[in-house]
Image (cartoon, rainbow, N blue to C red):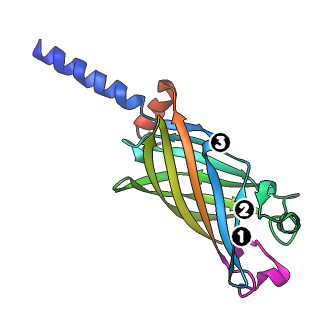
């Protein structure tokens, strides 16, 4: 009987773990902002349309996988003229490259609710492997990923011609984000509870 009780408790703990994954984006509670500098003056902006597909269990971060896709034409710099400029050929060239995509290939726990996210970032058909610092917390039934990343725009060919001079527009752009995630259904969360199989 004792062994049976222990087995039941083990199965209950396993079931609880499988239901702990997060990954359904809540758009109205999420944001993707940035701060650039022009002639040393900070310029704030944001992207208004982006999607995320994640499978993240804070108890099993190493099994996390996902994608974040940003519609670059949704950029808002606070100026209609500037918005038109950065959508053009010298900048994002949204006609040819409408999306930016981050593929989340690994998440490493650093302790204290801090995590390190790694994966390739694609912008303007240029891919660079990046590392993003983030925190995660649960609040009101949601999982909240928040963090920052310093994007070096010239690595992706963002800003050509006169805009290629970092003394005019800084090469470093600070990206700030919060992704609010609803819990996944148990069937989907089960994927994040087990490490991916080795081929």
Relative side of 143 to 2, left or right: right
Span of residues in magenta = 153-172
Separation of residues labelled 1 and 3 (CA atoms): 29 Å
Name the foreground residue: 27 vs 124.
27
Query: Residue at (84%, 59%) from the top-left corner?
Result: 94
* Nearer-N-terminus badge (1/3): 3
The residue where tag 2 is placed is 123
Separation of residues labelled 3 and 2 (CA atoms): 25 Å
**Residue 198 visible somewhere in the drawing:** no
**Residue 107 visible somewhere in the drawing:** yes
Name the foreground residue: 58 vs 112.
112
Q: Could you tell me residue 54's position as x and y percent?
A: 56, 42
* Nearer-N-terminus badge (3/2): 3
Tag on residue 74?
Answer: none
Mark in the foreground, 1 or 3: 3
Relative side of 120 to 97, left or right: left
Dot 1 falls on a residue whose secondary structure is helix
Q: Could you tell me residue 26's position as x and y percent?
A: 61, 39
Query: Residue at (68%, 73%) from the top-left corner?
Result: 36
Total marks shown come to: 3
The residue where tag 1 is placed is 156
- The answer to if 71 sits in the magenta stretch is no
Dot 3 falls on a residue whose secondary structure is helix
Q: Could you tell me residue 91's position as x and y percent?
A: 81, 69
Q: Could you tell me residue 43's position as x and y percent?
A: 71, 72
The residue where tag 3 is placed is 28
Asked if the residues shown at circle 2 and circle 1 are in contact, with their CB atoms under 8 angstroms apart, the answer is yes
């Amino acid at each position: 009987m004792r062994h049976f009780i222990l087995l039941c408790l083990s199965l209950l703990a396993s079931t609880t773990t499988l239901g702990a994954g997060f990954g359904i984006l809540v758009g109205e509670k999420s944001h993707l902002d940035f701060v650039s500098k022009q002639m040393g003056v900070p310029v704030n902006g944001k992207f208004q349309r982006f999607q995320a597909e994640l499978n993240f269990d804070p108890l099993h971060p190493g099994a996390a996988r996902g994608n974040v896709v940003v519609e670059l034409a949704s950029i808002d710099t606070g100026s209609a003229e500037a918005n038109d400029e950065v959508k053009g050929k010298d900048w994002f060239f949204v006609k040819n490259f409408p999306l930016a995509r981050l593929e989340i290939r690994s998440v490493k726990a650093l302790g204290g609710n801090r995590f390190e996210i790694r994966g390739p970032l694609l912008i303007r058909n240029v891919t660079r492997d990046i590392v993003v610092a983030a925190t995660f917390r649960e609040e009101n039934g949601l999982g909240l990923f928040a963090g920052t990343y310093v994007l070096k725009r010239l690595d992706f060919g963002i800003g050509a011609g006169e805009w290629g001079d970092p003394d005019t527009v800084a090469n470093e752009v600070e990206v700030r984000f919060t992704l609010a995630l609803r819990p996944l259904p148990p069937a989907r969360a089960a994927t994040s509870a087990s490490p991916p199989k080795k081929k």
